[in-house]
Amino acid sequence: EPSPPPRLPLITPVIPRQDPFGKDRAVTGSPFSFYQWPASWVWPVASHPDEPIVFGARLDFILARDEKVKIHVSADQRFELFLDGERFARGPELSDIAHWMYASFELGLAAGPHRLAARIWYAADQAGYAQQTVRGGFLCAGAGDGGERFHTGKAPWRLKKIGGYRLNRRKQIWLAPPRQDVDLSLVEPDWIEAERGWEAPQVGPTARTEFGTDTTPLWVLHPAHQPPHPP
């Protein structure tokens, strides 16, 4: 008797061996040259690069048929990913600005409505000394046919600040990551499903990967060296 088909969704971490968007998106010129992705970094409109923040991002979409889709995700500084309310990954790996890691996934999805969401932590100057940063932000890029449905900066992602979190290094050793204080009276336990507070994001620079030998003040994306952290 044949085996039944796998239950959907089916989530598989992937480690790309080459730029998922090829080498045909080069942008050259002085002072910086790079390969450009079709998605952009985004962050909440009211956020400030000098202030720690925890914020959510979510995208609703509908599939007409069962599909496999690939997404590439990163954040400054950390993310958790959720599909239809279930957490499935954390990341990215600790990065420096010239080698900023992104995580990749193949999602086997059933036909019908879905919600992809992320929770992003940005500690600003409260981060541990090993943590480099540009500013708090989130990035998602879809690959293959229909990938544009997932591009931050183009697809209808919505963002909001998640209240109740405070990140600080008070009474922490100098090289340690920040302590997270949580005020449960302010945290929305169902923040993914709550309808209040979601807004269109501030769209930042286009995502880019390394080109030539020029340096850059922005994130230069590299594929993760190991599979993303499980939930």
Image (cartoon, helix red, strand yellow):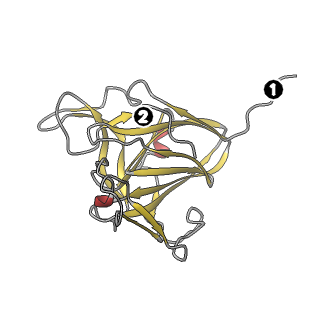
Numbered mark located on residue 33 in the image: none
Query: In the figure, is residue 62 to the left or right of 228?
Result: right
Sequence-wise, the earlier of marks 2 and 1 is 1
Q: Which x, y percent locates residue 61? A: 57, 50
Marks 2 and 1, how far apart at CA = 33 Å
Q: Which x, y percent locates residue 19? A: 38, 28
Is there any visible trace of residue 200 in the rendered image?
A: no
Q: What element carries label 2?
A: loop
Q: How many marks?
A: 2
Question: Residue 155 versus residue 168: which sits nearer the camera?
Answer: 168
Is there any visible trace of residue 84 in the rendered image?
A: yes
Question: Residue 214 versus residue 52: which sits nearer the camera?
Answer: 52
* 140 up-or-down from 158: above or below: above
Q: Which x, y percent locates residue 188? A: 55, 70
- Quick one: label 2, few (<14), some, or many (20+) residues within 10 Å? many
Q: Which amino acid does label 2 sit on?
A: Ala
Residue farthest bottom in this picture: 185
Q: Mark 2 points at which residue?
A: 224
Q: Name the residue under label 1.
A: 3
Q: Which residue is drawn at 45% across and 68% down?
A: 181
